[in-house]
Amino acid sequence: MISKWLIKENSYYDSVTLMIITKEIEARDDVENAVVVMGTDLNKDLLRNVGLLNDELNKTTANDLIIAVKMKDESKFEEIVAKVEELLNKKKSDGGEDYNPPTLDSAIKYMPDSNMVVISLPGAYAAAEAKKALENDKHVMLFSDNVTIEQERELKELAVSKGLLMMGPDCGTAMINQVPLCFCNKVEKGNIGIVGASGTGTQEIMVQIDRFGGGCSQVIGTGGRDLKKEIGGLMMTLGIQALAEDDNTDVIVLVSKPPALEIAEKVLQTLKKCGKKAVVDFIGGDDELVTKYGFIPAKSLEDAAYKAVALAKGQKAEEAPLFTESEEEIDKMAEEERKKFSPDQKYLRGLFSGGTLCDEALKLFTKEFGGIYSNIPLTPEYRLQDNKKSYKHTALDLGDDEFTVGRPHPMIDSYMRQQMIMKEAEDREVAVLLMDVVLGYGSNEDPAGSLADHIKLAKKNFADRGQHLCVVAYVCGTKKDPQNYEQQINKLKDAGAILMPSNAQAVRFAMKVVRGL
Amino acid sequence: MKVNELFKEELKVINMGLGSFANDLKSQDVAVIHVDWRPVAGGNKKMASLLSKLKGK
């Protein structure tokens, strides 16, 4: 193997663009390793790990593009560089011919009436730009992570003092004035406002509201740490106050992982003051506390949406049925699957792209089965020793840091999930594969298509050894999403997957199939 | 509160970072400009901090 590299000084490209190009180059038969990155410290570690770092590359800066390849035939390097350049140029031209100012200051001068700044820069630079935006009276959606909690506190205090939104850091989902931002589904307009501290949790509630015939007014993201003591729910509180004053919002939905008690009380007190009806989903948290304040707790993300839609229509908030189909029909479907297993097939394996959807699966499963192994376990004894090796019942959040080093998130790129599907297909003890497929802006343009062949192949592996693999899938999307919802559903069905209409129902069905095996 | 003013305005976005977020907005006819951002002082944090202090003066 020969290592070749090229440095293009002062050529900045975003990390997702470069990750997608790296993947394309690495797929070539004549390439063993390819790394197309900016010369940041993190990327130098990546180069070191695959044995491609040298003194020259070590001197590069975050503004220099590196193309480094380990390959069989050195004469192909020029061809590879040409391919990288072609892909980079294609990306640039996709952006159109518009004027792209070089700094935030010049962008503000160019569009003085801009009101929202969306920031997805590397974490080390993101906070400074967010601060600048707030100082210029712009609302901020900060998608970037790796922003310190002290910086988050400072940014949010500044935002609150000015009455501005400071959504994030690590905020993936928001919808302002019916415009989906970053990772977000397109839903019907309506009178339900959401303040969410968890990305795919918020997406699932939006999608289910749409499915139940309701609609959303505004969806405010807070970032996952907002309800931690250090931040004290600054943005959730501001979000509630804004929805309280919004004439188009009649019902408020809050969604977050269970906060510390004092923060939960603070948030619920703010909600109480606003006087609107509300559903609160502190996923797996304290229902009694929510009821004490006169609000309605939710049993699942789907249930939160179901109850919110009822309230929005002026009806009583009943609990969502466990299944949309009759339970008799569901039992029959589960039994059909169970009949086909061999005696050694016992386990559920969840391969999730949405962190909150995985978390919901862990909570629903643990309630009935006592526990499930994971890379984001509910209790330490269920932490996997090796996150890439499932053990007994396992559900993985493939969007967690360990799986995304040097790769785009699984909602953008299915590579890691394809690998994990094939890995599970080697295990004779697996009975059910459970998967989420998240549609909407930001997500892969054909996520179901990118998984369908691997699902078919996995099922064939089982069939070849006289076994049966049950695949349960849920498509978190609406008919208004850019991916074509019906086609996505059909691609999974054609691959042999059983489709359920919510994440909670998919988990419950999967549990029925593996119960007592 | 400024947030409530925002709810009544047309959303106009400045995007910094992933170009795909700007393209998604453009495809929905939302007013957006994408900043051709690059790290200040080539990512040299010490130099960037010095420059930022100079600018503040």
Image (tube, coloured by chain):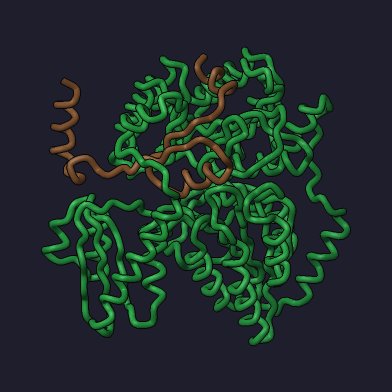
Chain colours: A green, B brown
Where residue A425 appears, as percent x and y from the top left, is 57, 76
Taking A370 as reference, is A461 above or below it? Answer: below
* Quarter of the C terminus of chain A within the rendering: bottom right
Taking A402 as reference, is A190 above or below it? Answer: above
Q: Is residue A215 left or right of residue A360?
A: right
Numbered-mark total: 0
Residue A131 visible in this rendered orientation of the protein: yes
Pick the front one: A172 or A472: A172
Where residue A122 appears, as percent x and y from the top left, is 33, 45
Where residue A135 appears, as percent x and y from the top left, is 35, 21
What residue is rendered at 65% in x and 49% in y?
A481
* Quarter of the N terminus of chain A within the rendering: bottom left
What residue is rendered at 63% in x and 14% in y?
A274
Which quadrant of the structure image shows residue A205? top right
Taking A7 as reference, is A81 above or below it? Answer: below
What residue is rendered at 17% in x and 41% in y?
B41
Pick the front one: A502 or B18: B18
Pick the front one: A30 or A12: A12
What residue is rendered at 19% in x and 56% in y?
A9
Where residue A384 appears, as percent x and y from the top left, is 46, 60
Name, please, the residue furthest toward the front. Answer: A97
Residue A516 visible in this rendered orientation of the protein: no
Q: Is residue A191 left or right of residue A230?
A: right
Taking A452 as reference, is A506 above or below it? Answer: above
